[in-house]
């Protein structure tokens, strides 16, 4: 069987590189090419990505944390936007991991492609003002499978996770949830992202947020592309979790399968 060739994109958020790449090294029948931003922006178009069966994102571009106004949004170039949209037009499968949901905050359509948005600062989404998102590290929770799917095949109906969770915007109408957390997604259980980038870690003083959805894994379609998002993926503890490893491998396998292409066709019809 020919290996699944993936393009693995990173940069924009710190992570334990040794443990992370060991995760992908452990996958049989998967070969990956790693690229970082900004070089990735020259590759993510139909011509330069043609040899990759699945695109995997563990990146967080489009945010500047080093200016006097940390969390400043940086717009993607017109060329990059066109190339990326051409990828979903031709149906390139995509897997987004963890902090990639915060990428390109100034480009609204990018959030629609993923199915959600983590906000470092409050902003309007679809004309409605939304508060900055929340985070909480090292949460011990039960992950519960919601529906049978090739991505969840081989997993227990519920399994243990210790990982960072987000209280973020999820566009529920556009996604099919696969897994939820049993943790309570209320503002009292999370910390303000804006406070964190302004130097006050683990603070929710004066911060409020509407109750969030508990979904930590979903699939969706965007134009002709099958999309998977896994909120898990913060640390070596997660990378080494057997359930997480199976979840990532299953996601790549399904995205590369005829079944995902048929699913997209049925959705579009």
Image (cartoon, rainbow, N blue to C red):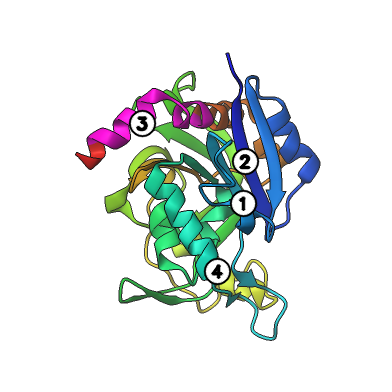
Q: Are the residues tagged 2 and 1 within 8 Å (C-beta)?
A: yes
> Considering only order in the chain, which callout, 1 or 4, is on the residue closer to the N terminus?
1
- Does label 4 or label 2 sit earlier along the sequence? 2
Other residues around mark 4 within 10 Å, as few (<14) / some (14–19) / many (≥20): some
Quarter the C terminus occupies? top left
Residue matched to label 3: 261
Mark closer to the chain start, 3 or 2: 2
Q: Mark on residue 43?
A: 1
Whether residue 165 appears in this view of the structure is yes
Label 4 and label 2: CA atoms lie apart by 20 Å
> What residue is rendered at 57% in x and 44% in y?
49
Which span is picked out in magenta?
Answer: 251-266
- Residue 21 locus on image (x, y percent): 74, 37
Helix, strand, or loop for circle 3? helix
Q: Earlier in the sequence, mark 3 or mark 1?
A: 1
Distance, label 4 to label 1, CA atoms, is 14 Å
Tell me the chief SS of the magenta region: helix
122 or 74, which lies in front? 74
How busy is the neighbourhood of tag 2: few (under 14 within 10 Å), some, or many (20 plus)?
A: many
User: Is 131 within the magenta?
Assistant: no
Which of label 4 and label 1 is nearer to you? 1
Quadrant of the snapshot with the N terminus = top right
Q: Disc 2 marks which residue?
A: 7
Up-down: is 207 above or below 81? below
Task: Give yes or no for contact between labels 4 and 1 (Cβ–Cβ under 8 Å).
Answer: no
Q: State the residue position of label 4.
A: 76
């Amino acid at each position: 069987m020919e290996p699944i060739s993936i393009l693995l994109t990173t940069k924009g958020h710190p992570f334990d590189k040794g443990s992370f790449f060991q995760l992908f090294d452990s996958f049989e029948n998967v070969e990956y090419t790693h690229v970082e931003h900004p070089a990735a922006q020259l590759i993510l178009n139909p011509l330069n990505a043609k040899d990759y069966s699945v695109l995997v994102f563990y990146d967080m571009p489009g945010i500047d944390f080093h200016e006097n106004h940390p969390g400043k949004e940086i717009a993607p170039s017109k060329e990059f936007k066109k190339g990326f949209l051409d990828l979903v037009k031709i149906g390139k499968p995509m897997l987004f991991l963890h902090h990639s949901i915060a990428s390109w905050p100034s480009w609204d359509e990018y959030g629609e492609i993923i199915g959600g948005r983590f906000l470092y600062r409050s902003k309007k989404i679809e004309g409605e003002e939304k508060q900055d998102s929340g985070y909480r590290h090292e949460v011990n929770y039960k992950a519960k499978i919601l529906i049978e799917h090739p991505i969840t095949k081989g997993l227990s109906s519920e399994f243990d996770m210790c990982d960072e969770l987000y209280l973020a915007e999820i566009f529920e109408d556009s996604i099919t949830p696969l897994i939820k957390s049993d943790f309570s997604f209320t503002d009292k259980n999370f910390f303000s992202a804006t406070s964190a980038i302004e130097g006050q870690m683990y603070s929710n003083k004066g911060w409020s947020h509407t109750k969030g959805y508990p979904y930590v894994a979903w699939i969706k379609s965007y134009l002709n592309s099958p999309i998977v998002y896994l909120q898990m993926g913060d640390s070596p503890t997660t990378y080494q979790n057997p359930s997480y490893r199976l979840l990532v491998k299953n996601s790549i396998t399904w995205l590369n399968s005829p079944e995902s292409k048929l699913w997209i066709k049925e959705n579009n019809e």
